[in-house]
Image: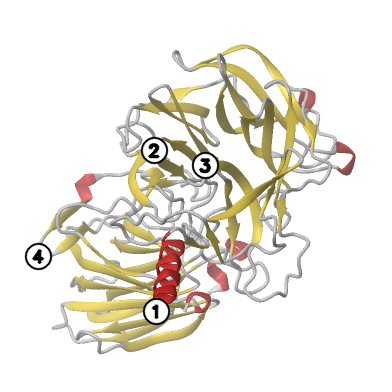
Amino acid sequence: MKRLLTILLMACSVFCQSQIKFINPILAGFYPDPSVTKVGDNYYLVNSTFSYFPGIPIFQSKDLKNWKQIGNVIDRPNQMNFMGDGTSRGLFAPSINYFKGTYYLTCTLIDRKGNFVMTAKNPAGPWSDPTWLPQVKGIDPSLFFDDDKAYIVYNSDAPDNKPLYSGHRTIRTYEFDPINLKVIGEEVQLVNGGVDISKKPVWIEGPHIFKRENWYYLCAAEGGTSVNHSQVILRSKSAIGPYTPYQKNPILTQRDLDPRRKNPVTSAGHAELVEGPDGKTYAVFLAVRPYEGNHYNTGRETFIAPVRWVDGWPIINPDHKEIQYQFTAGFKEVKQKAVPQSGNFAYRTTFEKSLDLSLLFLRTKDTSWYKLDRIKGLTMKLRPETCMGKGNPSFVAKRQQHLSCTASTELDFETTAANEKAGLLIFQSEKNFYYICKSADNGKTVIQLFKGNEESKGMELLAQQPISAASKKVYIKIKADKSLYSFSFATKPNNWITLKDNVDGKFLSTETAGGFIGSVFAMYATSSGKTSTNQASFKWLDYKGDDEIYR
């Protein structure tokens, strides 16, 4: 009996070691438009960053669950910058591919030069300067490498630029020269409108071509990147078509489910399929986690689901209607030494020698206004630029990755000028933010809370409390609890005083603010349009996620 029990325990141990539990999203927070490629036993994944800098993070994994950021594609200001762009403009929908020793990145710089391609020998970088593709008119370009040819496929205008309805788009392709990085020959239209133009489908986009068992598959999103988002599939015997749509499209959507369901995942689409370590197919895609209606502050996030092939067609999340927050797969987990990106987690970011790869600036990186120090941490100059403009303020941010979380920092700053402010932002756009800061009012030291003004470029003062001028160091904390935010400060560690609680968090949601991005916590200092020689130092940034569903 004991021997049988030992055998059973050993078998259970082996089985458990060969099981991996996925927790969705696999990249929590503002990580939209995922694209993934497999090279050997490594996976590399990229996301859109819009007007944030560095642009396009690159993650590496060996199991599709544990991701470590290894670099950023746009990490040099001379590659490109986004000065003058709103926060939801800039870089749209990157795609990563690998072919014969070279990594390729295609993307769209919206409102400017359009589509481009970049290359690297190491996915961590350095990446080349962009090569612009003026013939490729549209958005969301991706590459497909066939046996002897390569193609670039993308979303484009309606035929003859005469849309039959709002949102009427096409999917088109050119043959592509991967050596000289240019298109070849004539443009070919692959899809007009969507899988069934008689139903007036909108915004077919994010296309990827892949080959399986002598079939060419065209996988794309339809319905727009909100609650009607979906994923569709077509196939052909030729890379350039004609493509026949799957009769049971879409292969992924959440739009038909009860919006009142508990802990909903919505807006799923923009998927790419990849072979897992077990040889089975998986899909990475964007989706969102609203806390009420269509309100969410964490932006569009990266999810994963299994894929089953049925009669030669891939079905995403085949056993469930709802996207699962957790599921298991039959292969071994490979953990990495990195900050977790899924489930509940906590971390402390310090600024002793270098900035974490995940930290974000607005529009470009200018090393002249900040410095790093083992004692003081991150020191910023107070400059005239503000977060309400479209320049590069003294602003360093980290994504909000949970519906319920806290972010706090230790601030070393003193001033007697009302225009000089330093503190912590919860920031969604130039007009949609809250700012808890240390400043002065009539020469007295105060802690203030401001709200961005949707009607103008100003700020509205919500709360203010005086503190002793001797309190050079202060601690500032923002707590998010779905639709409510609370703002606190302390002059001694952990002796928190609430400045204002239960502040409207829907003001920060994509539903209210618009655009395509999620909220970020930002260390921010400004002299509010005036010249200043003052500076502020941030010792660390603490973050803790506490979503109920992961407890």
For the view shown, which residue lies furthest in the top direction? 185
- Residue 499 lies, with reference to residue 422, above or below; the image says below
Q: Nearer the viewer, residue 73 or 450?
A: 73
- Residue under circle 1? 2
Specify the label residue 35 is tagged with: 3
- Residue under circle 4? 375
Q: Give the label, 1 or 3, closer to the camera.
A: 1
Q: CA distance from mark 4 to mark 3?
A: 39 Å
Three-letter amino acid code at the position of disc 3: Ser
Indicate the secondary structure of the residue bearing disc 2. loop
Q: Residue at x 16, y 62 (%)?
A: 377
- Residue 213 lies, with reference to residue 456, above or below; the image says above
Three-letter amino acid code at the position of disc 1: Lys
Three-letter amino acid code at the position of disc 2: Asn
- Position of residue 36 in the picture relative to residue 205 (left or right): left
Q: CA distance from mark 2 to mark 1?
A: 68 Å
Q: Residues within 10 Å of mark 2 (few under 14, many from 20)?
A: many
**Residue 453: x, y in percent?**
51, 67
Q: CA distance from mark 3 to mark 2?
A: 22 Å
Q: Residue at x 74, y 26 (%)?
A: 236
Question: Which of disc 1 and disc 2 is earlier in sequence?
Answer: 1
Tags 4 and 2 in contact by the CB under 8 Å rule? no
Q: Residues within 10 Å of mark 1 (few under 14, many from 20)?
A: few
- Residue under circle 2? 81
Q: CA distance from mark 1 to mark 3?
A: 50 Å
**Residue 547: x, y in percent?**
48, 76
